Image (cartoon, rainbow, N blue to C red):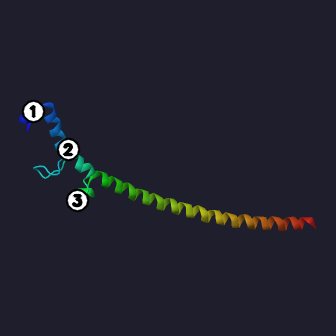
Amino acid sequence: KSERFNKSGLIQRISDVIQDNIRTNTYGGHRGALLEKAGITGDRSQFNNLLYNQISDYDTRIDRLNDALLAKENSYYSQFAQLEILINNMNTQSTWLAQQFAY
């Protein structure tokens, strides 16, 4: 391949580089760099490539963060409801005390 590279022109070299990167199979069974990263529609690489795996990881992370956010939100709602109950109790006591001092 290096001998061919040395004897070929610029366009042939560019073509070889492009083909190496988009090749579906090489002699060693490896795919081209672009297919390894992005995959190709209708092929097993469509769901088994670097970008798909990263997006899948991000989706999983987003789901976990959404669950944590929902749990935190529910915790705050619970605390706020408890605070409202305590404030109402204090208002009731305040009203009772005010009535006691009024007489």
> Dot 1: what SS?
loop
Q: Earlier in the sequence, mark 1 or mark 3?
A: 1
Kind of residue indicated by mark 3:
Arg
Residue nearest the viewer, comparing 8 with 85: 8
- Which residue occupies the extreme front position in the image? 11
Q: Residue under label 2, please give it.
A: 21
Q: Quadrant of residue 13?
A: top left
Q: Quadrant of residue 59?
A: bottom left
Residue nearest the viewer, comparing 72 with 53: 53
Q: Earlier in the sequence, mark 2 or mark 1?
A: 1
Q: Is residue 67 left or right of residue 33?
A: right
Residue at 88%, 67% (x, y): give it. Answer: 99
Asked whether the residues under the numbered discs 1 and 3 touch, taking CB atoms below 8 Å apart as contact, a structural biologist would say no
Real-space Cα distance between discs 2 and 1?
18 Å
Kind of residue indicated by mark 2:
Asn
Q: Which image quarter holds the C terminus?
A: bottom right
Kind of residue indicated by mark 1:
Ser
Residue at 31%, 55% (x, y): give it. Answer: 53
> Dot 2: what SS?
helix
Please tell me how crowded label 2 is: few (under 14), some (14-19), or many (20+) other residues with Cα within 10 Å.
Answer: some
Real-space Cα distance between discs 3 and 2?
17 Å
Q: Residue under label 1, please give it.
A: 8
Asked whether the residues under the numbered discs 2 and 1 touch, taking CB atoms below 8 Å apart as contact, a structural biologist would say no
Q: Residue under label 3, please give it.
A: 44
x and y percentages locating residue 26 in the rendered image: 13, 49
